[in-house]
Image: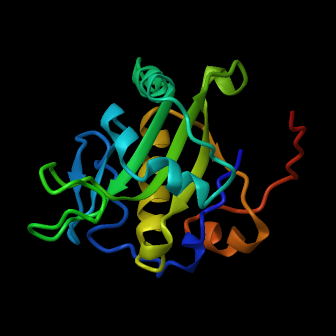
Amino acid sequence: MAANGGGSGSGDGHSGSGGRDDGALRALPHVTTDGFTLRRLVAADFSSNYMALLGQLTRAPPVAKAAFEAFVAAADADGTGHLVLVAQAPLPPGADAGLAPPSSPPTPIIAATATLLVERKLVRGGAPAGHLEDVVVDARFRGTGLGRRMVDALTAEARRRGCYKVILDCAESNVEFYRRCGYETKELQMARYF
């Protein structure tokens, strides 16, 4: 689990009208007051900066379009397991973000992403546990409170789905950010990579 925060720990702790919106994920897409659109990852995001954004967090080599589309189709297919949330940046009128040919519609800029994995359990009366993963804010949008909004939205969604806890792993440099989001240091992470 690599909920690094992607530097979002330098966020401003924004919790105003674009912040802790517990209903935001019930009615996606949700547009924040500052124009970001919180929505699920979609197959069309293959053409966006999504994989490059993940590359700001960890090693994220290119994937084939078919693999990306299969991942998106399987993610949260039953509405209970794997939700990939993205924050699409607002484009100024007439802007093409420098990514699309002049004859094409503007390519969306994904400003942030975060994933909620819901693990079914037999402990705690069968209540599920939530895992926050792959939290990253594009370097151009850090310090805007967007990381906090992503974490708050997925934490609220985990609660709505009946999770008894939400856990994450993060770099030591992001501990204070997650503390400001209401998380606490608990136990120790261990990993074995292949």
State the quadrant of the N terminus: top right
Please indicate whether residue 2 sits to the left or right of residue 89 in the image.
right
Residue 24, how many percent across, how many down?
29, 49
Render colour scheme: rainbow
The answer to which of 189 and 37 lies nearer the viewer is 37
On the question of residue 180 being in view, the answer is no
Depth check, front residue: 73 or 25: 73
Locate the C terminus by quadrant.
top right
Residue 148, above or below 21: below
Q: Is residue 134 left or right of residue 162?
A: right
Using residue 120 as the reference point, say whether residue 108 is left or right of it. Answer: left
Q: How many marks?
A: 0
Relative image position of residue 32 (x, y in whole percent): 24, 63
Q: Quadrant of residue 129?
A: top right
Q: Position of residue 128 (x, y in %)?
A: 60, 28
Residue at coordinates 52% horizontally, 54% vertically from top-left?
Answer: 52
Q: Quadrant of residue 77?
A: top left
Q: Is residue 141 visible?
A: yes
Residue 87 vertical placement versus 117 (above, below): below
Depth order, front residue of 44/124: 44
Q: Position of residue 38 (x, y in %)?
A: 31, 52
136 or 103: nearer the viewer: 103
At a point 73% along the width and 23% down the height, the residue shown is: 123
Q: Residue at x 55, y 66 (%)?
A: 181
